[in-house]
Image (cartoon, rainbow, N blue to C red):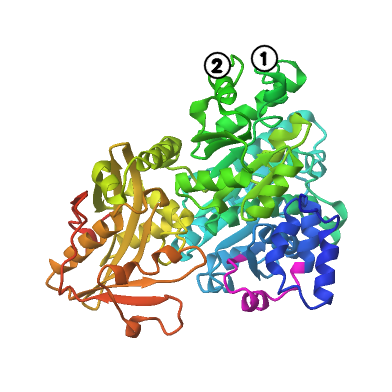
Amino acid sequence: METPVAADPARTLLDLRRDGRLAAEYPAVRALLAEADTRRTAHAGRVLAALDPDEVLAAHPDTPALTVAVVGHGTVGPLFGPLTGELARHGLLLRPYQGVFDSWVFELSDPGSALYAASPDLALCLLDPAVVFDEVPLPWRPADVARVLAEKTALVEKLAARFADTARGTLVLNTLPLPRSHSAQLIDHRSRAELGALWREANARLLRLGTDNASVVVIDLDPLLAEGVPAADPRLDVYAKVHLSEPLLAAYAREIGHLARHVAGLTSKVLVLDLDQTVWGGILGDDGPEGIEVAGGHRGEAFRAFQRVAKQIGSQGVLLAAVSKNDREPVLEVLRDHPDMTLREEDFVRVTADWRPKSESITALADALNLATGGFVFVDDSTFERGQVRRELPEVAVVAVDDEPALHVERLLRDGWFDVRRLTGEDSARAELYRGEVARSDFLQGFASVADYLDELGVQVRLRPVTSEELPRVSQLTLRTNQFNLTTRRLQPAEVAAYAAAEGSGILTVRSADRFGDNGLVGAVFLERRDGELRIDNFLLSCRVFSRGIEQGVLSAVLALAADDAGLHAVTGHYRPTPRNHIVKDLFPRYGFAPAPEEADPSGAEGLAFRHDLSTALHPPGHLRLDADPAGLLEGAHA
């Protein structure tokens, strides 16, 4: 029943290319590569790299495409095959830019360079050991390496600052591997130790760039090397100036694929776990609570390790849910009372234990959470259950585990489903916020009408200009919100800060609360004064707070802001359609905005335009208490 995994995806892709059907079949590539390892993905990527991205977009205009630039000290061409394959695994299309050989300093330092002209979403500066060892004298000692390392790290810091000031995307750096072919040139262990310490200190300095600079991400290559990936291939290193091995480039490309998925707004949000043979060993219905394996013994320790990892992931804002074919009461008994369980009932936003098809349980869970199933990751040991979910919900990511629980952790973590740039304050509270969402869904069932429900819900909305502390969360909303996102412009924290600080523009943040508690920062409105009008550049709202009249309350405040300003005579807004934001296609007309085709960008890049002439007021809904204070919003002084 499970979709068969192609033994050699590259062979299938070659056949499609020969038949002239590769561009037409591109949406199927994601499933074809879903379980491919880095080697097979790289092989398939080399086939896909020959495909013209414009040909794919002509056949499938909604395919998310990212421009990825690669520059470096050595030959970077071999990275493009793995990159193309890894992005395709996530349904993304690569628009590549390849820098000139060894031009990384020039391209990153010159704002007029072809790199900046390409306006990449991700700019990869591929660092390798030759960046340093090509400049040490002969003979050399650790002090010589220390001098070059200091110069290079200082140079990288300056280039990162230039990129942050100039570009809109994200600069991706990496730590430097230290091959034995260099350290073994020192014949005494004391000098080798000194070299190792200097090298690690330089890498630590690089890693801190990723924590201090909002436009920079640093990929740590040490965890990849620790899994046995060779740092370099001596022949490619010398003959082709490819200073990192092909396996390391493939593993690095997989990490970039995870980052690209986040940049494209496709980060997963919910981890759905099967229970029997996945969270614990054994079958609860057959073995009973005392017979399942959750700790102790070889297999029990493996299941405990998996539970610990799931709990760790859940602590960082990922929603955990259980979907099991079991009777409900025995499952709850284990989660509440089994003395050796690590995961408890309160770790899950919902525990579903019944006998429905699991695709139905996942769909019901998505409805209760007000989330799209495209953000779900499902883990199960059963071939049948995985196949059933894949067939009914192809947008759900499916992780296969089997009867070897020691491998569960590695398989769950293999694809970085939940990787983000950085955590925000809302992330640590997300599970609790969504448990409240489930409670609201249950609360709704007791009312005869939605109006009665809203009257009792006690919705409160607070609007204020964004603060510097809120910038990461607003950026996160632009990256993660797909449904209530009027233009789907993805912005990194530095871009959000620049927008908020510009004179004549500002960002209103939206916070909400109700009888079940505080929902946190759930939305943002990007506003700009232009030609006597107040322009809504974007309006985002978390799917957690849909259908509560919050959008009406926010628009009423925006219109009031414009009406109170003698220099403004209208409010304009844009809607740029995507495959996932159709729920807001009628937002502006619904609240009194008229189509304004004369305001639309002739290229169509900004989508449909609407205008409100302020001749009538819009009031917040009666069930909602609005607290709006946009004072100073458009003075460019916030954040």
Is label 2 in a helix, a strand or a loop?
Answer: helix
Q: Is residue 398 above or below residue 296?
A: below
Is label 1 in a helix, a strand or a loop?
Answer: loop
Q: Residue at x 75, y 22 (%)?
A: 299
Span highlighted in magenta in the image: 48-68
Q: Residue at x 71, y 30 (%)?
A: 277
Residue 15 x %, y %: 85, 70
Q: Is residue 519 above or below residue 240?
A: above
Residue occupied by mark 2: 337
Q: Is residue 135 above or below residue 46?
A: above
- Of the residues under marks 2 and 1, which one precedes in the sequence? 1
Q: Residue at x 56, y 31 (%)?
A: 312
Amino acid tagged 2:
Asp
Residue occupied by mark 1: 290
Asked if the residue under mark 1 is in contact with the one under mark 2, i.e. CB atoms within 8 Å, the reply is: no
* Mark drawn on residue 405: none
**Residue 179 appears left or right of 493:** right
Q: Is residue 27 above or below residue 234?
A: below
Q: Is residue 54 magenta?
A: yes
Is any part of residue 207 visible from this angle?
A: no
Q: Residue at x 78, y 65 (%)?
A: 46
